[in-house]
Image (spheres, helix red, strand yellow):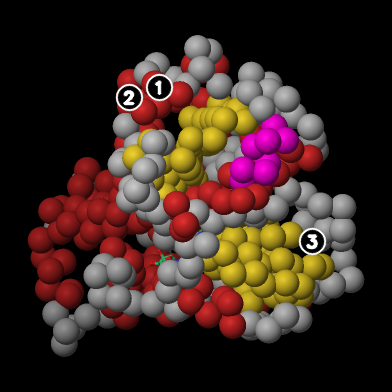
Amino acid sequence: MTAPTRPWFWLAVYLVLVSTPLVVLILAPVPAKGGFWWEAGIALGFAGLIMMSLQFALTGRLRFATAPFGIDVIYYFHRFLAYALLLIVLAHPVFLLLDNPGLLDDLHPDRISWPIFSGVASLGFLLLLVISSAFRKTIRLPYNRWLRIHLVLALAAVASGFAHMWAIGYYSATPSLQWLWGLIALSVLAATVHVRLVRPWLMTRKPWKIRELTPEQGESWTVDLTPEGHAGLDFQPGQFAWITVDASPFAMREHPFSLSSAPRADGSVEFTIKELGDFTNRIGQFPVGTTVYVDGPYGVFSMDRHPQAPGYVFIAGGIGVAPVLGMIRALAERGDQRPHLLFGAHSQWDRVPRRDELSALASRLNLTSVPVLEDPPPGWTGEQGWMTREMLERHLPENYREMQYFICGPQAMTKAVEGFLHELGVPMRRIHTELFDMA
Ligand SMILES: Cc1cc2nc3c(=O)[nH]c(=O)nc-3n(C[C@H](O)[C@H](O)[C@H](O)COP(=O)(O)OP(=O)(O)OC[C@H]3O[C@@H](n4cnc5c(N)ncnc54)[C@H](O)[C@@H]3O)c2cc1C
């Protein structure tokens, strides 16, 4: 049976799961008579705990559930829900105190019982989790260190939350309710074991090797990987994968990169990587033959999901050219003759990664290439400056509203271009974006 792929199905699943506590509160035998604030406070506590548990599933990269949305959208949703669930969990004690202000006494450090302490601890872990994530870039916490801290805090928040619920015993005393909450706690454990142990173990069975490393314009590198003893990846051009270079897949040192190659018969793949930070600055130093682990493919940024279009418009800024290159290569290999358009926004002409290959591909396709340079060389007659609505209007064909748009580049450019396309009447469903900054 194929997994349901419609977004509304998964949204409905999410809402049903989060509202389970309300159903439980209506149907379960009432353990003690409470007022409105009391019952609402307890419902919020349960809803918060289930939302915390579901946060694990959201970042578990479950292909069947992420495919209809795209994994970047799921990560944004995860981030947005973290704020919502923090508010819900904070409202839980506030509502209980509104019903019974005397409870404040139970929080006194000398009298606090462990069931209450575990609840306070859960809230504390959650607060730390949200604050450390919101300010990760401000406090310059390296991504991979943050990821490890994030996982520990998340497990601590959810474990102490469940301990609090079981120890308090409201709506969890009957065997059927114990089963329900036990099942939810087990799912969190299963999601963590799957993502952090089972999937890395599966990856160790399908290693890759660096076959070639080529320096490119614009401080970027082409990394060519060949599969070792397996068939490679089955992917759609434009998708991405997480790669771990010269480290165990259990080490949580993976980074996401778009596949810049089209699918190849020998299973090898290529990434185009820009030097930007700790890991990417070292990419050119790994020797040929280094072992790499690849987790993918992921993402919905691919023209193969919209095969009926009369043509494609690619808008790439800087290293955002990587997934676009993969799609253009695939179109060229298939001998596609539809009219396509490529806007390439770059700072300077000699910093355009794979510039020569892109012009060679354009000549094999019915592809019009429009380079847009921020800092053009003397005598440049092409487009220059930032991308504007007028610039788009100058080059888009008459039937531009029917074409499919793929935008990948800096966030500011992506947002601006999306806005221009809306103003020009391009339907939202024809505009697809990939942001390299989903974390
Ligand atoms: C879907 C997607 C596709 C991408 N494709 C490409 C590509 O084709 N070519 C390319 O050059 N870059 C691509 N990137 C960006 C690339 O992942 C980051 O530049 C790289 O991970 C930075 O790591 P660093 O240690 O060198 O830099 P750092 O200075 O450590 O990180 C810079 C920023 O990159 C992000 N980042 C760092 N590590 C990770 C990680 N493990 N997972 C998620 N985000 C991280 C964080 O927001 C961080 O603040 C892509 C990103 C995403 C999300």
Q: Position of residue 341 (x, y in %)?
A: 55, 30
Identify the residue at image location x=64%, y=53%.
260
Farthest-out residue, top: 398
Q: Which residue is mark 2?
A: 390
Q: Is mark 1 within 8 Å of ligand 1?
A: no
Vertical order, 384 against 133 (above or below): above
Which badge, 2 or 3, comes first in the chain's sequence? 3
Helix, strand or loop under label 2: helix
What is the magenta segment's predominant secondary structure?
A: helix
| Residue type, mark 2 in image | Glu
In the picture, measured across the screen, residue 94 lies left or right of residue 272, that is: left
In the picture, measured across the screen, residue 296 lies left or right of residue 108, that is: right
The one nearer the camera, 190 or 8, is 8
| Residue type, mark 3 in image | Ser
Q: Which residue is mark 3?
A: 268
Q: Position of residue 381 (x, y in %)?
A: 39, 36
The one nearer the camera, 125 or 318, is 318
**How many angstroms separate mark 3 from mark 1 (CA)?**
39 Å
**How many angstroms separate mark 2 from mark 3 (CA)?**
41 Å
Farthest-out residue, front: 379
The one nearer the camera, 398 or 107, is 398
Determine which quarter of the picture holds residue 423: top left
Q: Which residues are magenta?
A: 358-365
Q: Position of residue 121 (x, y in %)?
A: 30, 76
Q: In front of the other: label 2 or label 3?
A: 2
Quadrant containing the N terminus in the rendered view = top right
Q: Which residue is mark 1?
A: 394
Are the residues tagged 2 and 1 within 8 Å (C-beta)? yes
| Residue type, mark 1 in image | Arg
Within-10-Å neighbours for mark 3: few <14, some 14–19, many 20+:
many
Residue 374 seen in the figure: yes
